[in-house]
Image (cartoon, rainbow, N blue to C red):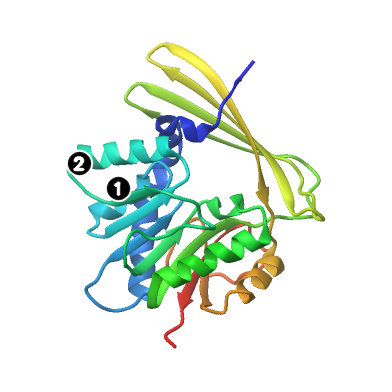
Amino acid sequence: MPEQRDWYDTPLYYDIIFDADTPKEGAFLDALHERFGRRGKSRQMLEPACGSGRLVLEMARRGWKVSGFDGNARMLEFAEERLKQECLKARLWEDWMQSFKLPGVQSFDFAHSLVSTFKYLIAEKDAVACLQRVAAALKPGAIFALGVHLTDYTQTNEDHERWVAERDGIHVTCNTHTWPADRKKRLEDIRTRLTIRDNGRGHVQETRWQFRTYNATQMRALLCKVPAFELLACYDFTYDIESQRELDDSYSDVVMVLKKGTD
């Protein structure tokens, strides 16, 4: 039987699975800032729910002064160690997306939260609070790149995704199952199993959780509750700066470019 364990408590395995696209995501974030961001030499970046720090590290490599927070102390310890190994620095602290407080007086030129982390905010009031807090943390004209997986409420079958990755002799297979959404409750059940082979020894661990669901109309309704942000553009998870999309239900993985007003 799989070990029941929160995959955020094993940051190395989590990092191995998601790290493959990190350079591509980093280049995309730089391109978004160049196309839509505020002008100037300042390069202060905020990452809510920064997890294992893979993008904290990548953006620090790219010359950004990065700040980030996460609700899991083990993730933050892992991120700090990776930064230390490369002689890079970032300001990291433990906090939550819906209620975070910045350490000291600081404002940012760019914020981002990719790969559907935002959907952990089950209550609408928490989703609104997160957007409001990010907007308050940004300088006028700065942007927030927010990535989410939109839900197809007509889908009746379980969805399955599989990733395989390896680092330093550690082989990780990730199988994620998502069950059809409950449209009334705005929830979907998810199960992730990690199969790990670490220098000849193997084990399986399983995490179960729920995401809040959004289709394009529901996402637009949420954004209307935070007038500090204007929706400038949308992209999918191919991270191609030249392939702009509309916010609609014709595709599932969307990155929204939200700009804080200058008034």
- For the residues labelled 1 and 2, the Cα–Cα distance comes to 9 Å
Quadrant in the picture for residue 239: bottom left
In the image, 233 versus 129, the foreground residue is 129
Tell me which residue sits at (46%, 82%) in the image: 261
| Crowd band around label 2 with a 10 angstrom C-alpha radius: few (<14), some (14–19), many (20+) | few
Q: Is residue 195 left or right of residue 92?
A: right
Q: Is residue 101 left or right of residue 209?
A: left
Decide if residue 18 is in sight here.
yes
Tell me which residue sits at (25%, 77%) in the image: 40
Q: Element type at marker 1? A: helix
Residue 42 image position (x, y, % from top left): 24, 71
Residue furthest front in the image? 104
Q: Are marks 1 and 2 in contact (CB under 8 Å)?
A: yes
Decide if residue 239 is in sight here.
no
The residue at which mark 1 appears reads as 57
Give the answer, above or below, for where 251 lies relative to 168: below
User: Can you tell which mark lies on residue 203?
Assistant: none
Residue furthest top in the image? 200
The residue at which mark 2 appears reads as 86
Give the answer, above or below, for where 85 lies relative to 147: above
Quadrant the C terminus occupies? bottom left
Q: Element type at marker 2? A: loop
Quadrant in the picture for residue 207: top right
| Crowd band around label 1 with a 10 angstrom C-alpha radius: few (<14), some (14–19), many (20+) | many
Residue 158 image position (x, y, % from top left): 74, 39
Give the answer, above or below, for where 200 lies relative to 109: above
Tell me which residue sits at (39%, 68%) in the image: 32
Identify residue type, mark 2: Glu
